[in-house]
Structures are given as C-alpha cells and as structure tokens.
Image (cartoon, grey):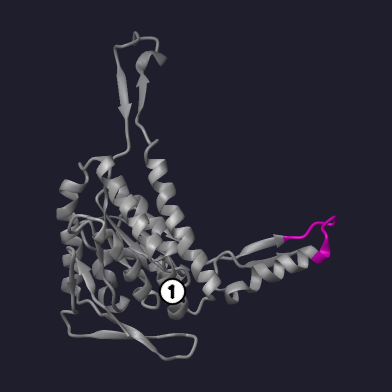
Amino acid sequence: MYEQKLLINNNWEASGNNKSISINSPWDNQPLGTVQAASQEQAGGAIANAADAFIKWRISNLSERLEIGKKTADLLKQNQTALSELLSKEIGKTIEDATSEISRSIDYLELTMAALKHLHGSVYHGDIFKKYPRGRKTGLYSRIPLGVVLAISPFNYPINLSVTKVIPALLSGNTVVFKPATQGSISSISFYQYFMHAGLPPGCLNIVTGESREIGDTLLTHPQVSLIAFTGSTEIGNHIRAVSKGIPLLLELGGKDVAIVTAKADLAVTGEQIIEGAFSYAGQRCTAQNTAA
C-alpha cells in the first residue's frame, strides 16, 4: 500500500483536515494506496512557498537548473521499471503503454534540457527606421520567467501530460505548484519526488492532492499564480477561464482526431489504423480518432 503525502516546501505533509483519499486499481478494484486531501490553507501555502522560492530560483544559473534536471533523469531511468509498474496498476494501462509513457516522459525531460541550452536572446537595431543611424537604438529581447505556474494534469496520462507543463516551467526558472488528477496522484508523486532527490531547492516544486471542489478555486484564484496550465474537460476549462480573472492560461481541452479516408487509400491498412487509433487505451485519449469519408 502506498501512502503519499503532500509536498510543500520540500516537506512531506499530512492533510491539515486529517482527510485522505483511497485509490483503487482499475484492474481489480483492490486498494492501491492513499493520497492526502489538502486543506485550503495548505493549497494557498503551497503557492505562497512557490512565490517565495521564485525570488532566488528565477536568477539561478541555467547550468544549475540543467544539472538538477540531469540528475533527475538519471534517477528516473534507474527506477523506470518500478514507476511503469505503478502507473499500470493505478490507471489501468497495459504495462507496455505504461512503460512507453514513463520512457517518453524521461525523453521529454532530456529534450527540454537540450532546447534550453540553445534558447538565446535576440538583438535588434533601430536602423530599420531612416531617422536612426546604426547603433543609435538597440533592443535586447530575452525570455524571462513568469513566476508561479499552476499545473493541473488529467487521469489518462498523469505523467506525460504533466511533464509538458512542469518541466519546461521549472527548468526555465519558474516555480511550480502541481495538482495531479486524483487517479494518477500516487504515480505522479512517485515520479516527481526524484527532483528533490536531485537537489531541487525547497519550494520550487510543490505537489498538492485532494478534492477539486475543496481546493480548486483556492489554487485558481490565488493572486500569486502567474500562469495556469490545464489539460482536461471543456467544462472544467470553461470554469477555469471564468474564475481565473485574467491570469494567462494554457488550456488543452477535450477533443477527438479525425481520420480522413481518401479514394486511393489501402482500405485494409486504413481500417486497421483507424481501429487502433480509435480503440487503443479504450479510447481514453484526446487523440482518439473519429472518421469522416
């Protein structure tokens, strides 16, 4: 049995409400473990800690952040089998699909680090305008961290659809408060704990679990949140848009892909591909296919 706690300021905390949530495996409906149901105070405290940590993390050297990322990737690779088995048990994926998700997530971490090494500022000269001689006006443009990023992931790809939010934000100098979907929380905490083992400073990554009806709006409306990144239903996405009041949003909402079959298509191959695209993982993917002739 797994008993996961909240991660706030690099400390593992029990719920301030003395509440926990039991998680059963979809394979056999047997108990897999528990996660804590954070209180509103703990949810707000996680964001406040992230805001405090941002003051130093935003001016940390890129080399320092990449070194932590490299150590994290190495630890994840060493524990990849155990993480894949846990993910399979918790959300009902085949072990092959779970292994693929963990592997792709580690790849994404390494690809992000490689991209950040080549992310440079740009210099523009004002001599594009006739009245400015070259050297009279020069503009330097660079990307700077925003602040606290609130990342909210769905149940179907709890690792893969969280790394695309958490890792670029974190390694770019932002701090992160991560709220995973409840079914997937055990795997998520198990995955991200390795950032702490790799030396991530306190407060840079906080993980809160619990009931969205209890802590959701506390997180979404907190004045120290600088960006919200969410993957999930259109209904919840519209709620986030309504209550966030001008906070920048990255929303990936529900949808399906269309399979377009042309007159010259090999129907045997096409049929197999459409069936696989529509029904793999029981269709629980935003990229699952519908058809149009």
Bounds of the magenta segment: 260-268
Res 119 → quadrant: top left
- In the image, 153: left or right of 21? right
Res 162 → quadrant: bottom left
**Is residue 250 at all visible to an observer of this figure?**
no
Query: Residue at image x 19%, y 79%?
Result: 15
Amino acid found under the numbered disc labelled 1: Leu
Q: Main secondary structure of the magenta part?
A: loop
Mark 1 Cα shell of 10 Å, populated few (<14), some (14-19), many (≥20): many
Whether 213 is among the magenta residues is no
**Is residue 227 at all visible to an observer of this figure?**
yes
Residue 85 image point, x, y percent = 45, 75
**Rendered view: 34 above or below 41:** below
The N terminus: image quadrant: bottom left
Nearer to me, 241 or 134 = 134
Q: Residue furthest right?
A: 264
In this figure, what is the number of numbered marks? Answer: 1
* Residue identified by numbered label 1: 87
Nearer to me, 292 or 281 = 281
**Rendered view: 35 above or below 271:** below
Query: Residue at image x 14%, y 54%?
Result: 52
The C terminus: image quadrant: bottom right
Nearer to me, 203 or 181 = 203
**Rendered view: 203 above or below 216:** above
Q: Secondary structure at mark 1?
A: helix
Query: Residue at image x 40%, y 53%?
Result: 109
Residue 285 image point, x, y percent = 55, 69
Query: Residue at image x 24%, y 60%?
Result: 196
Residue 142 image point, x, y percent = 32, 33
